[in-house]
Structures are given as C-alpha cells and as structure tokens.
Image (cartoon, grey):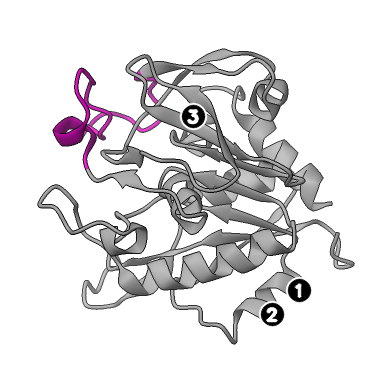
Amino acid sequence: MSTRGKPLIGMTGRKDTSARLLSTSMHAVGATYTRAVQRAGGTPVIVPPVMHETDWPVLLERLDGLLLTGGEDIAPARYGQALEPWTGLVDDERDYAELGLVRAWLALGKPVLAICRGHQLLNVALGGTLYQDIMAQVANTFDHAYVPGRPMEDPVHDVAIESDSALARILGGERFAVNSAHHQATWLPGQGLEIVARAPDGIVEAAELRNHPFCLSVQWHPEAMLKLSDTMLPLFDALIAAAR
C-alpha cells in the first residue's frame, strides 16, 4: 500500500460538458463512484481520459488500485469489428488511454474493479469481443438499457453467480437483484477471463481474471445501488483490501 496512508484508487474519467458554461469541457466521474471508494476506506482520484504512454508509469507507481468506470461505447475497431449502426457515441482518445493503462496495470498484477463500460473494456483489453447491441444481435433477450427517468439504483433483473467464484464469496451469495444501464455486452471473453455471472436471458454480467490477485468486473452499477442498501459495498471493500 502507498506510504501516504489510505490506498489511492484511480478512477477512469470521461469527458463532460455539463458545466454551467456548456462550452466548457470537463473530465469527470459520477459522484457515486467516489463516494463508494471513500466509504470503503480508499482515497479516490480521477484519471483523465487523455493519458499517454509517458503517463502510465507514473500511475502504475503511485496508484494502489484501479476502478474502471462506465460511459460511452468502445469503438468496434478496438475488438476487430466493423462499425454497426447500433453503436452509440465513442471516444477514441479515451479508448486508447484506458486500454493502454489497463494492459500495463494487469501485467503488474495490481488490483482492479471494472464496472459497466469498464467491464466491457477489460474484456476488450484481453482480446475479447462485444455485442454492439444486445437487442439487435441476441435472440430471446430483454432490454438491458437505461430507461430515462428510472432511478439508477433500482433493480431491474436478477443475476446468477457461480458458486465457486470470488464474486460469490465477496458478496456472500449466488443470486442478487441488480440495476441495468447498458445496451452492449460481452460476446467472446478475453484471454484468461472466466464468466462468473449471467442474467436470466444469458447475457454476461460478471467476469474474473484467472491467476490474477484481484481482478473483477461487473456489468451492473454496484456504486449506484449503495443508495438503497449496502449489499454491494463488499465489492469496494474487497478492492480497497486488495489495494492495501
């Protein structure tokens, strides 16, 4: 752990223009992420989505843990597919920054928790692929996308977790009701990734990287669910414990 005290957790940021002056660009993360890390005993810092190779060694040295956050779609070219009309906005600069950082991070065996887009990005970083749109490409499924006006913390469907997984051990169970705010999903898992949870329609909801000290990814938003209960807090507790 860092000699500075509490573990320093880097959270991948996104580009935003929601300032009072709409022409002002910002790099930001949702407050639910920072509060979840703080509650679990970590010190959160934003990793801007503009990092380059010269920045990665500094982050690798100084950060104790990494939280890959949600956001826009990942460019299909990053996982060897042509752009389909179903894919939404992408940020090539963010893709480049995060994929490079994650690959360097995993090589050192440092702890990482990946959420929503982060879950998908981890898969792509390891050579996996994505469905560009669940409803368009997967038969007999339901809509996993966010519904405007629905509180982010509200459960939408259950997930079934493999009993012998680290995720089941951390959460203390094998079935949970979770929220949902994604239209893409894991298709082929990346090298070393083990699928450990699925939705009732078979969509991948969580994965773990084998032979890594701590690398978990979930498709739902556990940080938002903390508004209703502490059921998902152990995920963040486990990240902070690994970062120590």
Q: How far apart are marks 2 and 1 (CA)?
A: 5 Å
Secondary structure mostly seen in magenta is loop
Question: Which residue appears at 35% of the width and 63% of the height?
Answer: 78
Query: Which span is picked out in magenta?
Result: 133-156
Relative placement, left or right, of 157 versus 138 is: right
Question: Which residue appears at 67% of the width and 48% of the height?
Answer: 38
Residue 71 horizontal/vertical position (percent)? 36, 53
Question: Helix or strand or loop: what does disc 3 sit on?
Answer: helix
Whether residue 87 is in magenta: the answer is no
The amino acid at mark 1 is Glu
The residue pinned by badge 2 equals: 58
Which residue sits furthest left? Answer: 85
Relative placement, left or right, of 119 versus 41 is: left
Of circles 3 and 1, the one toward us is: 1
How would you rate the neighbour count of disc 3 (Cα within 10 Å): few for under 14, some for 14-19, many for 20 or more? many
The residue pinned by badge 1 equals: 61
Above or below, comparing residue 136 to residue 23 in the picture: above
Q: First in sequence: mark 3 or mark 1?
A: 1
Looking at this view, is 230 or 131 the one in front?
A: 131
